[in-house]
Image (tube, rainbow, N blue to C red):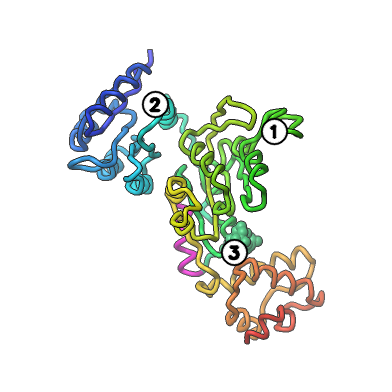
Amino acid sequence: MRRKRHLLIVDDEGNIRKILKAAFERSNYKVTAVESGDEALQAIASDPTIDLVLTDVLMPGITGVELLAHVRSRREDLPVLIMTAYGTIPQAVEAMRLGAVDYITKPFDLEVLKRTVAHFLPKSGSKATKKPAKKSDGSNLGLIAESEKMKEILALVKQVADSRATVLITGESGTGKEVIAKTIHRLSPRADAAFVAVSCAALPETLLESELFGYERGAFTGADSMRRGRFEVADGGTLFLDEIGEVPPAIQVKLLRVLQERQIERLGSSVPIDVDVRLIAATNRDLRKAVDEGQFREDLFYRLQVLHIELPPLRERKEDVIPLALHFIERYAAENGTQLSGLSKDAERLLLRYSWPGNVRELENAMERAVVLAPKDKTELTPDLLPPQLLSAA
Ligand SMILES: Nc1ncnc2c1ncn2[C@@H]1O[C@H](COP(=O)(O)OP(=O)(O)OP(=O)(O)O)[C@@H](O)[C@H]1O
Ligand SMILES: [Mg+2]
């Protein structure tokens, strides 16, 4: 018979320990409950059968975050799940950055907690079945990153790709938020599953809701057949929610629920469906400000920005301009069957002098335009092929 799964519960509050111990023992777990981080460390050191640690974040002595750091350095394979009160969510988020698998907010629903614990338990025989992430070394990503800032971002992208934690990508329009989201997906263990993108600003509230969660036949007038939502389509993969700042409050609540409970319900149904989705969100709005102004839920904001990537505008990374320009010229010249393959010195100077308010997208459009305008036998892009705003800025 398979041995019982062994849970280590760490909380300084006696009541919580009692409730959790009873609840998990009823579900056939072996439970060790301790009241401090120190005791937890001793338990972990002396008992290799512990399968998962469920710890409070704020305790006298060693905090949950410190406990996590110790566990990371000693037993890298041991999942740590954080319990937090609303006021200590930032610490829980910090713990996730350091490698906690997830956090759950008190007061919690025991069913949700049990499901979360079960989700992160190593599958039996996991050592053998754990499939190695198919790793690309980052070349052939079609991503230009010559500037120091972009090299740092690429390093961060590689680092966050493995985790399931939600990523928030911010940056001005056209800076490459979607490209970065796709890159994270392609470098992640989920690369073989779907990358699904939804633009939250493009759809009115009711459509966005049915797009995300799907619906049953008859859920509303016109729903003449069942439709799976984007969360279901992205199961096992990555869901990219673009312009997350535009999501209306009612859907914010639902998003928070999916992130915490890993389940969705189609509209017109109350049957929960398990979904395993990594969420990447993007916005060109200041979400913190939207939170302060009461337009965006703070709890959802915390969930979304566990990992944060901020893309600098193109004018702050000029070293990328020429490599990007050449990259786009090559691409569009191949598509259009023209000879264009380089830039004249004057053209380079103009590209570098311009401030690119529309960022990489504007540069891409300018290069496409130049390729289309260029005579078939021309090999070098000259200033006359550039859009007028570049010339007048000179
Ligand atoms: N570093 C890069 N290397 C190569 N191509 C890039 C890079 N950054 C952006 N691009 C290209 O620039 C265009 C704009 O990028 P993307 O759509 O990802 O920007 P965005 O930040 O999502 O823009 P928006 O805010 O308008 O949605 C895309 O065609 C993308 O392929
Ligand atoms: Mg975009």
What is the spatial separation of the Cα atoms under label 3 and label 1, in whole angstroms?
32 Å
Residue under numbered circle 1: 227
Q: Report the span colored magenta.
A: 147-161
Q: Is mark 2 within 8 Å of ligand 2?
A: no
Look at 79% across and 67% down and name the residue there: 337
Look at 40% across and 29% down and name the residue there: 109
Residue under numbered circle 2: 110
Please state which amino acid type lies under the numbered disc 2.
Leu
**Can the viewer see residue 142?**
no
Q: Which mark is residue 173?
A: 3
Seen as rendered, the residue at the extreme top is 1
Q: Earlier in the sequence, mark 3 or mark 1?
A: 3
What is the spatial separation of the Cα atoms under label 2 and label 3, in whole angstroms?
42 Å
Q: How many numbered discs?
A: 3
At mark 1, the secondary structure is: strand
Residue 357 horizontal side relative to residue 386, left or right: left
Residue 157 is one of the magenta-drawn residues: yes
Please state which amino acid type lies under the numbered disc 3.
Ser
Residue 49, compared with residue 161, is above or below; it is: above
Displayed quadrant of residue 40: top left
Where in the image, quadrant-wise, is ligand 1 located? bottom right
Q: Is mark 3 within 8 Å of ligand 1?
A: yes
Q: Which mark is residue 29?
A: none
At mark 2, the secondary structure is: helix
Please state which amino acid type lies under the numbered disc 1.
Arg
Residue 353, compared with residue 167, is above or below; it is: below
**Quadrant location of the C terminus in the rendered image:** bottom right
- Main SS of the magenta part reads helix
What is the spatial separation of the Cα atoms under label 2 and label 1, in whole angstroms?
31 Å
Query: Quick one: label 3, few (<14), some, or many (20+) residues within 10 Å?
Result: some
